[in-house]
Image (cartoon, helix red, strand yellow):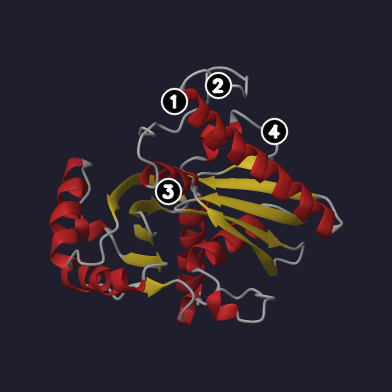
Amino acid sequence: MLLAVDAGNTNVVFALYEGRTIKARWRIATDPRRTGDEYAVWLMQLLAIGGFDRSQIDQIIVSTVVPRALHNIEVLARNYFGLEPLIAGEGKTDYAIDIDVPNPKSLGADRAVNAIAAHARHSGDLIVIDFGTATTLDVIDFNGAYKGGIIAPGINLSLDALVGNTAKLPRIAIEVPESNSVIGTTTETQMLIGVFWGYVAMMEGLIARMREEIGRPAKVIATGGLAVLFDEATDIFDVVDPDLTLDGLALLAERAAAK
């Protein structure tokens, strides 16, 4: 079995694959100070609860946008599984795609892996929107080349900035507003309208501009934890695939094994 690890700025997601099927997934808050031993105590308990044995895991692949977290995940792989982890974008797990920007090494591993998975599943030009700590919109052409994209603050980051820099605005949960009205009558509804519908308007506007610039039909693929939530409020997405990044890691691991 494969253990795919996606270390983002907010959470580290561990997914257990049998072939291309996710058998279990777990997440823990990203903390670069968390040691390999701490990861092991947490993960071994979850494996046992799920009815899995660590000896079933024969391959580990890691993607990270938090360099300081990588070392401790490598320690976890070596000390507790006896495996040398594959690192997305390195060695046998080279992306093997054309990254058509001036500094290809600046592209985050998660975005590269998304591009690989999206092109493997869908034909034509693609726009991948990933809802994470930051919201990224990436363009992959019909040949599978990464052409560039957009980085915007994630919706929770925007809300944190709003609440953290005002004296009286309360913390609210991100959810689909109960009414389609954009005229709120309470502080809470006004905040939710501003954050939620403002974010939807931003996405729709940016995607429309990207499609116009591409000049060809482009399928929009949404991933990340909030993709399903926003899918209820807009018809801009052609596909919602919450596991796109993890599945891209599984594909890279499969290619590495074949090499």
Between disc 4 and disc 2, whose residue precedes?
2
Give the residue at the far front of this rendering.
Answer: 167
Q: Which residue is mark 1?
A: 188
Amino acid type shown at disc 3: Ala
Looking at the image, residue 24 sits to the left or right of residue 129; the answer is left
Q: Label 3 vs label 2: CA separation?
A: 20 Å
Helix, strand or loop for disc 3: helix
Q: Position of residue 112 (x, y in %)?
A: 56, 66
Query: Could you tell me which residue is drawn at 12 percent across and 56 percent down?
Result: 41
Between disc 3 and disc 1, whose residue precedes?
3
Q: Which residue is mark 4?
A: 235
- Badge 2 local density, few (<14 within 10 Å), some, or many (20+)? some
Query: Could you tell me which residue is drawn at 40 percent across and 67 percent down?
Result: 64
Q: Label 3 vs label 1: CA separation?
A: 16 Å
Give the residue at the far right of this rendering.
Answer: 215
Residue 197, numbered label: none
Which corner quadrant of the image does residue 85 belong to?
bottom left
Q: Label 4 vs label 3: CA separation?
A: 28 Å
Residue 184, numbered label: 2
Between disc 4 and disc 3, whose residue precedes?
3
Disc 4 + disc 3, Cβ < 8 Å:
no
Q: Which residue is mark 3?
A: 161
Query: Could you tell me which residue is drawn at 34 percent across and 52 percent down?
Result: 16
Between disc 3 and disc 2, whose residue precedes?
3
Disc 4 + disc 1, Cβ < 8 Å:
no
Disc 1 + disc 2, Cβ < 8 Å:
yes
